[in-house]
Amino acid sequence: MRAARSGDAPHQKGFVMKSYTVMSILGSIALVSAAGCNKKSADHSADKSADKAVDKTPAKPAAAEIAISCGSVGKDYDTCKEGAELWAKKTGNTVKVVTSPTSSSEKLALAQQLLAAGATDVDVFSIDVVWPGILGSFFLDLKDYTGGSEKNHFESIIANNTVDGHLVALPWFTDAGLLYYRKDLLEKYKEAVPTTWAEMAATAKKIQDGERKAGAKEMWGYVFQGKAYEGLTCNALEWVASFGGGTIVGSDGKVTINNPDAAAALDAAATWIGTITPPGVLNYEEEESRGVFQSGNAVFMRNWPYAYQLAQAATSPIKDKVAMTTLPKGTGASARGAATMGGWNLSVSKFSKHPKEAADLAIYLTGPEEQKRRAVTGGYQPTIKSLYEDKEVLAANPSFAMLLGTSSSAVPRPSTATKGTYIQVSSAFWNAVQTVLNKQATGKAAVAELAEKLDQLSHGGSW
């Protein structure tokens, strides 16, 4: 449901009007009491009284407190808090930063709980790129507040965030999966940067074994996000798409996952567990993967762009030893490099008590000034194309030129085709993938069973 344009805060507008009426009445009383004086004196007194009675200066709006739900991965919380406080200082309002789970799946569940209850605890929500279709009915149409500034962002993300003609979220930063690697170790073992998953696995095993033999007993070849949550959907979709196995569900709503290429992709990933990848990866989210890699105990890592600046921090054991590249491709005639489209956006709850101020905060945080600050200080990838030509942004993030191309060709998750049922689709997918990684099922059996579940869920493609 579309919320009406809020305009000025009603209680503030009413206060100004009421004050004006009372003071006008007092001015009239003063004029009547002066009637016995001579005309010149009466006119002078009337003018003076009227000047005092009617204060035409608009009343200063009361400060609003806006609560924003920030992320908790890497520098998410700190950079969000810093930006919100800059807005508060600029506007005279106050902000309250609400923490959220690190798992995107748990964060979605919390947002659904709050919004379904009509809670006013959070005014501005940070939402994943696949949530607009799930949560859009609870958010304001931000086109009523932007004045057209949404045109500065990537068109594909604005289209993704538009539900039934309503702009329910503004792009905050974008993401695409990347392959991080230890460039010093590749040089030491005279290995090239891999372009296929098979090359990655072979190089990872060679360096892992060599380093362990040299005394680095905790070294592993490859870490990723393998926990049963949305992060595994992102990783596994990259494997499947890179092998030419499609995107789980096609743009027409038809289930496509049951094919030999998708099965082969999952079987290939299963061979990594226990050989080049620690078994514990099946409980890893982004930060657990980064922890292993940044401590110097992994050769390769799949993660989002945010991890680069953290790996390059002054206290990082791998500072100046890390680089990143596009993700490898699979095997087969349709093989290609594939990175899942990620990113986060800001939405304003229609239950906010201060919709105008909340929208203003969302617009400020997603604007060019703040996106530049976040890119330079936190490595967050902008959604405003002009920032990819900014000298300060590129100096802090030399890889952004590559990221621009990666993001423009990133693989979308099937949230548009599956609409409000996406979270059930993703959950079924990541659970099926885990059965293969756990050696409980083959890729062929897993995708066949998954396709059957999704066909039932979609009623044959009619989501």
Image: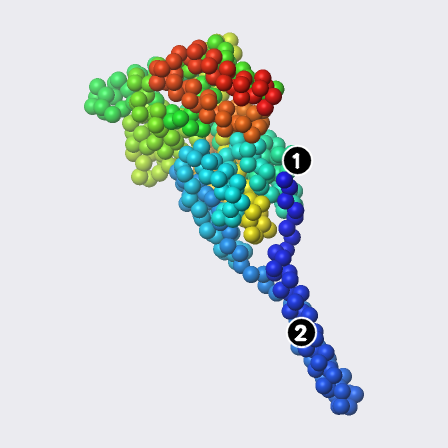
Quarter of the image for residue 417 reads: top right
Instruction: Say which element carries label 2.
Output: helix
Location of residue 454 in the rendering, given as x and y in whole percent from the top left corner: 52, 19
Location of residue 351 in the rendering, given as x and y in whole percent from the top left corner: 56, 47
Left or right of 9 in this view: 193: left
Eyeballing the image, is 84 above or below 289? below
Task: Please name the residue shown 64% across and 60% down the image.
Answer: 13
Task: Please name the residue shown 46% across and 51% down the image.
Answer: 96
Location of residue 311 in the rendering, given as x and y in whole percent from the top left corner: 36, 34
Left or right of 141 in this view: 87: left
In this orientation, does residue 106 appear? yes
> Which label number is shown at residue 153?
none
Query: 237 or 436, which lies in front?
Result: 436
Query: 351 or 63, which lies in front?
Result: 351
Location of residue 239 in the rendering, given as x and y in whole percent from the top left corner: 45, 18
> Which label number is shown at residue 165?
1
Q: Callout 1, which amino acid?
A: Gly
Q: Callout 2, which amino acid?
A: Met
Query: Which tag, 1 or 2, sits closer to the chain's start?
Result: 2
